Amino acid sequence: MTTERAQAVYHATKHLQFCDIAAIDIKDRLGLGTVAAGLRPLGVLEGDGVELERIRDVLVDHGFHTLVSRSVWSCREGRLDDSCPSLRLLREVQAVPTKRERVLWFCNNLADRKSLKGRALTKKDAGMLLGYPACCVNFQVESDAKCDVAFLNAVIAKVGHDEQSILRALKEDVGVDMPDDVFDFDNVARTDTQFPFVMHVACSPCLDGLTPLSADLNASHEGLAQTLDPALHELILEVRKLCANLRMTDDGKVNSRVKNQIDQLHRTAYPLIRRK
Ligand SMILES: [Zn+2]
């Protein structure tokens, strides 16, 4: 592990803003460190392009091969759920992909950068490339699919089975009641609590201790965070704990207080970055 390189690039980017959302900003700083230290071959910054150009210049100076693309993933998983043929209609109206405009990939090897260029990635491809545990990547893809099916079934329950009516309802974005248990909010909050140093959302078997992959990744990333900057290590622990609290409450007042607390911690840790 080349922690010197990780340290050098961490300090060279300390004054730059990765993202205006504090929790993502610190996650991205550690994510960059993991690639610089050789813990994984490549990474991506999604921080709404706050200072993407400037960060890119620094990364190039530190020997990374970079690539700007419009999004992390750009095509949907090929396989559609046979139990819900109307999923095809949802695919027709869903925008591909997300609201993000530009993301910055950074690779240790030129070969990885070359293979990224011009390649349309699914969410699963991207997760695997980014070194997330396969169990967690598959869990995410399956829970997305479950969510889509539940959403379509809710639409059908409202407007009936006629394809034109379903399409119209999807385009007009009619409100539907979704069952609570299709979302994996729980896994997000539990990942914040149990594995604060990982970049992905952990699957239930990882969270329940049935597979060690997320725990192992968390331990190695935590070691790196400590080496990079004890203050970053402490900040990640505090912010992820607050994020878990945020997700467990839906009280607007508590939420804004916790968000302010997170921003304050972030400002104290990174006083030099220019904020919007
Ligand atoms: Zn897992």
Image (spheres, helix red, strand yellow):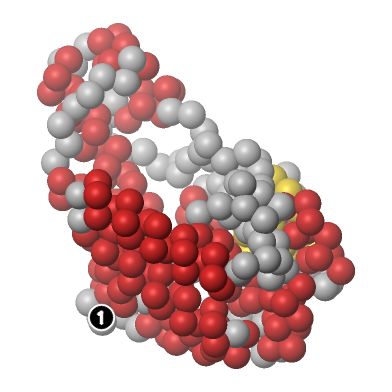
Secondary-structure class at tag 1: loop
Q: Residue at x 43, y 23 (%)?
A: 92
Q: Is residue 183 visible?
A: no
**Nearer to us in this view, 145 or 254:** 254
Q: Is residue 123 above or below residue 236?
A: above
Q: Residue at x 67, y 56 (%)?
A: 274
Q: Which residue is mark 1?
A: 210
Asked if residue 109 lies left or right of residue 27, the reply is: right
Q: Give coordinates of residue 242: x percent, y percent.
A: 33, 67
Q: Give coordinates of residue 159: x percent, y percent.
A: 17, 15
User: Badge 1: few (under 14), some or many (20 or more) residues near its Cα, within 10 Å?
Assistant: few
Q: Is residue 151 visible?
A: yes
Q: Is residue 180 above or below residue 207?
A: above
**Nearer to us in this view, 177 or 244:** 244
**Nearer to us in this view, 122 or 236:** 236
Q: Amino acid at mark 1?
A: Leu
Residue 106, image quadrant: bottom right
Q: Give coordinates of residue 64: x percent, y percent.
A: 79, 68
